[in-house]
Image (spheres, helix red, strand yellow):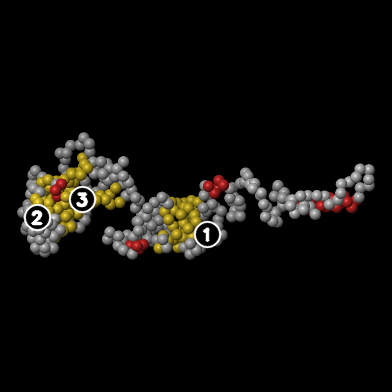
Amino acid sequence: MPRNGSGTYSLPEAAFVFDTVISETAVNSNFSDLATALTGSVAKNGETTPTANLPMGGFKHTGVATGAALTDYADVKSVQNAAYVWAGTAGGTADAITLTPSPAITAYVTGQHFFFQAGAANNTGAATLAISGLAAKAIEKNDTALAADAIIANKYYIALYDGTAFQVTQLGGAEALTSAAIGVTVQGYDAGISTTPLTEGLHTIFVPAAAMRPTVSNGCAIIADIETTAGRPDLQVLDFDASSDEHAQFQIAMPKSWDEGTVTFQVWWTSTATDTDGVSWALQGVACSDGDTADVAYGTAVVVDDANQSTAEDVYVSAVSDAVTIAGTPAAGDICFFRIFRDVSDANDTATEDARLIGVQILYTIDAGNDA
């Protein structure tokens, strides 16, 4: 017996005695037992294979090479570097993504997950993912099939197999819920899962009529306080005639986060009439930086139309206008001068009474998360 079951080796024959005849049988028995013990040992050159678990007694294998097969040791460096779950830039097509991690997997397993960088945005919505040449599986977000452009080119994702499909989540990003995800219309739009980062998006600034002034030339009436009923809201309005274009001005020191692009606007207004005639409101703007002259022309005016709704003193809100290009050379932190007027020559301006401006909401987009 080579070892006693606890790792101790003892020769089966007693030690040889000096000046005695050596027994052939005893020598051969010892040699045979030694050969058996060596055969049952682990060879450093890899010639032998263990036939049972090898308890390490609190010790570790050191200096191991990086594993290259599914049955190899995973060294700490590779685990820390996510080498076995990082699949690199996705291949395939935008709607049929492929991943090739190393080593390759041989089957999908529930809970299996991989990190990857998207090579392109999915174009048509529903997309699939195939790993290591295995069958393609549907990609979902929150158990919902993808909307178009839910995957963003060059962004990083984790894909987790849930037993049926791959649940994919963007890493370090923010993705907005939509009607498909929450069952309601979001801000009147249904454009699928938003791919807009937090540093982009639509913001608003409301400017009341009380913060505006009639222009020196062709100005509207001065601010007026209109009482509806005692104890109820008073309206602070600027009145615009129906007979000629009249103007008011206001200015905004734009946030540094503004992307210096076009803006849009909505008009809050009211009327003393009980008809359904229309009013056309126009807005134009120009930007000035530190040291710029204010003696500069406004940009092209953009008109938005609205109409009375048969009740005096109702509050009306126009549709959002088309894009207004700000003249000058807009830069971060600029002050923007705006001029609003009633465009009585517009075919849709049919009201014969004054239009009463309550305020204007400016809608702008940002390219930074704050004004630092």
Would you say 56 lies left or right of 280 here? right
Q: In the visual, does 138 lie left or right of 201?
A: right
Q: CA distance from mark 2 to mark 3?
A: 22 Å
Q: Name the residue rendered at 35%, 58% in the picture.
A: 177
Q: Please name the residue that numbered disc 1 is placed on.
A: 133
- Res. 299 visible in picture: no
Q: Amino acid at mark 2?
A: Glu
For disc 1, the neighbor class at 10 Å (few under 14, some 14 to 19, many from 20) is some
Secondary structure under tag 3 reads: strand
x, y (%) of residue 265?
A: 20, 52
Q: Secondary structure at mark 1?
A: loop
Q: Are marks 1 and 2 in contact (CB under 8 Å)?
A: no
Disc 3 from disc 1: Cα separation? 56 Å
Q: Nearer the viewer, mark 3 or mark 1?
A: 3
- Name the residue tied to disc 3: 206
**Residue type highlighted by circle 3:** Phe
First in sequence, mark 1 or 2: give its number. 1
